[in-house]
Image (spheres, rainbow, N blue to C red):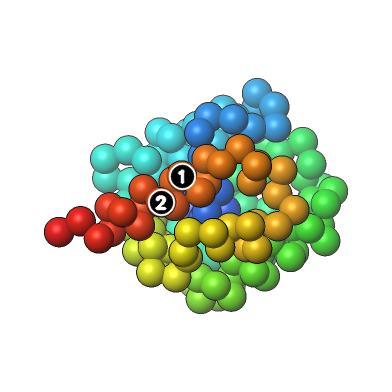
Amino acid sequence: MRAITFRPHHFLCSLGYQGKGYDDAFTANMDQVVADGLHQSGGDDTLITVVRQADVICGPCPHRRGEGCASQDKIDGLDARHAERLNLTEGETLTWGDAKTRIAALVKSGDLSTLCQGCQWLDLGVCEDALARLISDDKTP
């Protein structure tokens, strides 16, 4: 099975994804990767390799500039905070299930205001809701 690639902050973006995006092409790609992939039965076995450049989610993003982003400083900050909190290293490969276990263990309710500072999607509250569900599910026997 071939691994997909994720920037560090896209682990939490994928957890909270609710069908919204920058434009139709971006949303269609997120639907394919996340809603039709990671969030479906068997998605927990998906292999993900950590990268520090444009990844599978960035592909059709209207803000993509080569392997970078029009808001590269903001993205670098998001990636650095997420990589540190989730103990992610560039080139590391893990499953989506392992990533969710790591998120549940290392990210607590209220942490997203710091981890995701500057993200335009934060105010929608969907990521905080998804995190709460994950943490709750993780504690269910």
- Name the secondary structure under disc 1: helix
Tell me what residue is drawn at x 28 percent, y 59 percent: 138
Q: Residues within 10 Å of mark 2 (few under 14, many from 20)?
A: some
Query: Split into 4 quadrants, where in the image is the C terminus?
Result: bottom left
- Which residue occupies the extreme front position in the image? 110
The disc placed on residue 129 is 1
Question: Is 82 positioned to the left or the right of 4 in the image?
Answer: right
Q: CA distance from mark 1 to mark 2?
A: 5 Å
Question: Is 66 positioned to the left or the right of 44 in the image?
Answer: right
Q: Residues within 10 Å of mark 1 (few under 14, many from 20)?
A: some
Q: Mark 2 belongs to which amino acid?
A: Ala
Image coordinates of residue 65 in percent, x first then y, are: 82, 47
Image coordinates of residue 24 in percent, x first then y, are: 65, 23
Disc 2: which residue: 132
Q: Is residue 40 visible?
A: yes
Query: Split into 4 quadrants, where in the image is the N terminus?
Result: bottom left
- Which residue occupies the extreme top position in the image? 24
Tell me what residue is drawn at x 38 percent, y 63 percent: 104
Q: Mark 1 belongs to which amino acid?
A: Asp
- Taking depth in this image into account, of 128 and 94 the one nearest to the observer is 128
